[in-house]
Image (tube, helix red, strand yellow):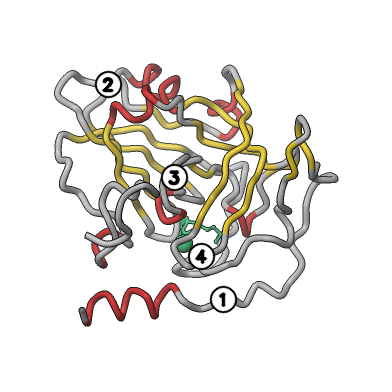
Amino acid sequence: MLLMFMVSAGLSFPGCGSQAVQLDGVEIREYQGQRLDSVATDFRENSIKGPQYIDKDSYRLEINGLVARPASLSYDEVLDRQRFSKVAELQCVEGWSVSILWEGVMVRDLLAQAGVKPEANTVIFRAVDGYSSSFPLSWFYDKDIIMASRMNDVTIPPERGFPFMLVAEDKWGYKWVKWIISIELTNDPSYKGYWESRGYNQNGDRSGSKFD
Ligand SMILES: Nc1nc2c(c(=O)[nH]1)N[C@H]1C(S)=C(S)[C@@H](COP(=O)(O)O)O[C@H]1N2
Ligand SMILES: [Mo]
């Protein structure tokens, strides 16, 4: 109970994102007749260490662990494959949500490049601020999960997770890892990410319970 209270308190600040978010173009606010929320104004900033500013030129995405060919990819190398877009809604456990057009690469295509070993069953996403979350390997194949580089037709700005954010459709916002720097394959389904190790549900499905 005490743990749950501390967790809620930690997430319950409405956020202090009063500074304007700079975008590298004009974001679209409607897609195929569907209204979209704003990248610039509709999110609440409540990241564990505040916004992170990653340098595009020195950036590397590591794909490691139980893979045949560990990879260290530059920004352009990550994006040098087929791109996919979809509208998906991010819902934070605090009670706010945003519908956004996401564009990026299929996680399973990145995994194929590194060659997932047969014994792997879990994927851990890690971010530059020390944040992490883990997922069953099969979920990426079953749901066509993408890692986005663009939102509403603009590059993801630093405050929202540049260069890459996981579009963890149908899962709570805390599974949508921003500022991704590594993807690790493991055979340990019990690995707990940042909020999961503080009492939030491991699976994070919005259809299930918020707490473990
Ligand atoms: N690296 C990182 N990713 C993160 C977080 C974080 O603190 N660090 N917070 C998560 C939570 S709880 C939510 S609701 C979404 C919200 O994104 P926003 O902070 O851009 O609104 O990012 C998720 N991804
Ligand atoms: Mo959240």
Q: Secondary structure at mark 4?
A: loop
Q: CA distance from mark 3 to mark 4?
A: 28 Å
Tell me the mark number nearer the camera, choosing from 2 and 4.
4
Q: Residue at x 39, y 41 (%)?
A: 182
Q: Secondary structure at mark 3?
A: strand
| Label 2 close to label 3 by CB (< 8 Å) | no
Could you tell which of marks 2 and 3 lies nearer the N-terminus?
Answer: 2
For badge 1, the amino acid type reads Pro
Q: Residue 155's quadrant in the figure?
A: top right
Could you tell which of marks 4 and 1 lies nearer the N-terminus?
Answer: 1
For badge 3, the amino acid type reads Ile
Q: Is residue 160 left or right of residue 192?
A: right
Mark 3 surroundings: few (<14), some (14-19) or many (≥20) residues within 10 A? many
Tell me the mark number nearer the camera, choosing from 3 and 4.
4
Mark 1 surroundings: few (<14), some (14-19) or many (≥20) residues within 10 A? few
Q: To which residue does mark 3 refer?
A: 181
| Label 3 close to label 4 by CB (< 8 Å) | no
Q: CA distance from mark 2 to mark 1?
A: 40 Å
* Image height of 74 relative to 195, above or below: above
Q: Is residue 65 left or right of residue 85?
A: left
Q: Residue 118's quadrant in the figure?
A: top left
Q: Toward the viewer: 94 or 79?
A: 94
